[in-house]
Amino acid sequence: MLPIKQLMVIILISTVGGCGVEKSQTQMKAELLETDRAFAAWSVEHGAAEAFRHFLAPDAMELSPRSEPVYGRETIYQEMLNAGEDYILAWDPQDGDVAASGDLGWTWGRYTFSFQDADGIDRVNYGKYLNIWKKQPDGTWRVVVDMGNQSPAPKTVS
């Protein structure tokens, strides 16, 4: 049986080591959420198509409602360009997490899709999204799966 002092040292080292892993996990999650916020800012500043081209992995897949999956960053980019650029896609990450391995993660949030309809009336659609992210060999996070769907307008507080 181990003397009490050795046992206490082992417990202390195990506890401190465990905290380091948790802190690292917290840091990875914060980094991923910050990357998603940068992705959202890029969309507002440069347009959604350019943002997706910049933040998607080359082999990304998009799962849009009422359509078949779209494969490949460049194909997704071209489809977004073909849909027109007279809209604003903005989003706000709500939460996410990173696998203990540090190479996969997810984020979800709420988005707004603002545009003018055929009559020139300003419209806004609301929705939520889920992105699956993969850390690339160069250390950057890139979206490998993008999916979203519409939601009702947010409730207003009266």
Image: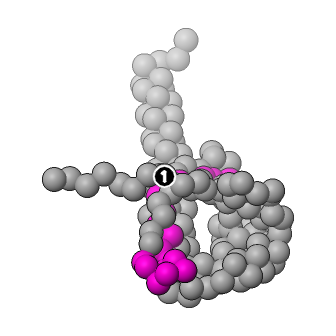
Confirm whether the magenta stretch covers residue 52: no
Residue at the spot 55% in from the left edge and 49% down from the top edge: 97
Mark 1 is surrounded, within 10 Å at the Cα level, by few (under 14), some (14 to 19) or many (20 or more) other residues, namely few
Relative vertical location of residue 155 with respect to residue 73 in this rendering, above or below: above
150 or 141: nearer the viewer: 150
Q: Residue furthest left?
A: 158
Disc 1 residue type? Ser
Percent across and percent down for residue 7 are 47, 23
Residue at the spot 76% in from the left edge and 57% down from the top edge: 67
Confirm whether the magenta stretch covers residue 110: yes
Splitting the image into 4 quarters, where does residue 85 fall?
A: bottom right
Percent across and percent down for residue 153 are 39, 56
Under circle 1, the secondary element is: strand
- The magenta-colored residue range is 104-122
Relative vertical location of residue 25 with respect to residue 44 in this rendering, above or below: above
Residue at the spot 71% in from the left edge and 71% down from the top edge: 56
Q: Which residue is mark 1?
A: 151
105 or 102: nearer the viewer: 105
Relative placement, left or right, of 142 versus 156 is right
97 or 58: nearer the viewer: 58
Way the structure is coloured: one colour
